[in-house]
Image (tube, rainbow, N blue to C red):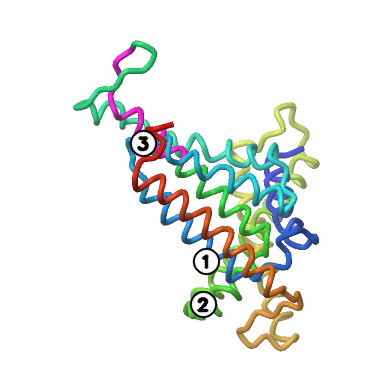
Amino acid sequence: MLDLQKAYIAWQKVDDYALRPHLLSEVDPRVLTLLTFLFVIVIVMSSPHQPQQLLLFFPYVILQAKLVGISLKWLAARLAIILPFVLFIGIFSPWLERGQQFMLFGYSLSVGWLTLLSISLRALLCVSLGITLLASCGIVGISRGLRQLKFPKVFCLTLYFIYGYFSLLLQEMAQVQKAYLLRKVSKKQRIAWQDYQEILKAFFMRVWLRSGRIHQAMLCRGFDGLLYQRRQYDGYASLAWLGLSLLYLLGCYFCYRYDVLQFI
């Protein structure tokens, strides 16, 4: 299967999780969005030289993924895609931070290695929280939740349309690539460099025409700038998940603030 088709299927699978009934489907998107923001803030505040503090957040991410129904293997495969980019960002830390040293298995290493590990864990945790949030309530639930939290209307609609049209771009590009390879047999299943110009022309024309049809369909259906969702949410379940998550977050912050892990 083509790489673009795999990417589009993986992108659509996140939306499929949001449409399925799961244990967090009754929780208000405002609660899930607010909790994600709080966890990201605490994760970013952690010390760059103490990556062991970030290990406290992984049980919460795993629990939320299990409640939504996300396979840990599938989630790990998504995280493996961004890991090279994360390592590229912090790859020079071991050579830029050489002032302090620490011992590991009898070897003296600079604290830059701890910074590199901390950057990687932060990125993996934040992306995991974003994926589980998107799979919990979907992009419509997130946009409506942000709007109900008094975020600007322009920001919420822009977020919704960027997500929707990125999926459209992946779908159209996958179809153009598939049509090209069906018409031109290639052993490597790749697009020749001399054909990229025609491929991009067809791609942009298809996207332009389809976006026009989508906009016209939205206007015909009476789009008024608001996002509607028929799903009902349980207030008691939302309060319970909010309380338990805040307790866990408070415990993580307490361990981070007073460095409890050094006594374990």
Residue situated in front as seen by the camera: 10 or 38:
38
- Number of other residues with Cα within 10 Å of mark 1, as a class: few under 14, some 14 to 19, many 20 or more: some
Q: Which residue is tagged 1?
A: 34
Image coordinates of residue 47 in percent, x first then y, are 33, 42
Q: Give the structural element (helix, strand or loop) at label 1.
A: helix
Give the residue at the far front of this rendering. 263
Residue 179 seen in this snapshot: yes
Q: Please, what is the three-letter code of the amino acid marked with disc 3?
A: Gln
Q: Are marks 2 and 3 in contact (CB under 8 Å)?
A: no
Mark 2 or 3, which is nearer the eye?
3
Q: Give the structural element (helix, strand or loop) at label 3.
A: loop
Measure the C-alpha gap from mark 2 to mark 3. 33 Å
- The residues colored magenta run 107-121
Magenta stretch encompasses residue 112: yes
Image coordinates of residue 189 in percent, x first then y, are 72, 33
Residue situated in front as seen by the camera: 27 or 84:
27
The disc placed on residue 55 is none
Query: Which corner quadrant of the image does residue 141 belong to?
Result: bottom right
Identify the residue at horizontal 43%, vertical 49% (top origin): 43
Identify the residue at horizontal 74%, vertical 26% (top origin): 187
Q: Give the structural element (helix, strand or loop) at label 2.
A: loop
Measure the C-alpha gap from mark 2 to mark 1. 9 Å
- Number of other residues with Cα within 10 Å of mark 3, as a class: few under 14, some 14 to 19, many 20 or more: some
Q: Which residue is tagged 3?
A: 50
